[in-house]
Amino acid sequence: MEPHSQKAESAPSPSLIHQDLDLIVRTIRDFFSADTERVVVDSPRDHRRITDFVRNFMPRLKSKIVLYADKVPLFEQQGSKKKSPRRWSAESGCVRAAPSSLSAPKRSPRWT
């Protein structure tokens, strides 16, 4: 029997059988690859979590994780402070920035 199956058999109902990684680490797991130029993180705590994950599962990519430590906020420094146009996406059910001001992986079906 698999560990989750054993836990499911012995746990009272309702019980949490499996908890996935948090959003930041899931994003790194799903989208970070050798094709990624770099990942810039402006939180020391999040940088540490990401580097720990990458060290364990993608050690060759660890050098691509960069901690942003400048005084100017990251998005202001990148010119993202401007008000970007928003539009409704019926497919994803959310308001999002127009593609010209936002980049997403090409393999992501929700971003066109």
Image: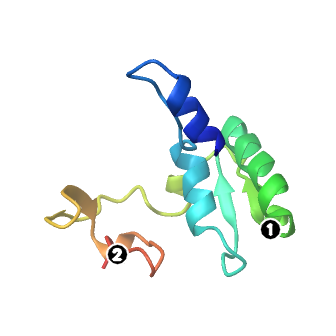
Q: Is residue 107 left or right of residue 10?
A: left
Return the residue at label 2: 109
- Which sits in the foreground, 112 or 58? 58
Report the amino acid beneath label 2.
Pro
Residue depicted at 72% across the width and 38% down the height: 44
Q: From this view, report whether residue 24 is shown above or below residue 108.
A: above
SS state under label 1: helix
**On the image, numbered disc 1 is attached to which residue?**
61
* Residue sitting at x 31%, y 70%: 110
Above or below: residue 90 compared with residue 53: below
- Say what amino acid the circle numbered 1 marks: Leu
Other residues around mark 2 within 10 Å, as few (<14) / some (14–19) / many (≥20): few
- Other-residue count near label 1 (Cα within 10 Å), few / some / many at <14 / 14–19 / ≥20: some
Give residue 104's mark: none
Of residues 77 and 44, the one nearer the viewer is: 44
Residue at image coords 44%, 60%: 80
Q: Residue at x 65, y 51 (%)?
A: 41
Residue 30 position, x and y percent, is: 57, 64
* In this picture, residue 87 sits left or right of residue 79: left
Q: Residue furthest top?
A: 12
Pinpoint residue 85: horizontal percent, then vertical percent.
Answer: 23, 65
Gap between marks 1 and 2, in whole Å?
A: 25 Å
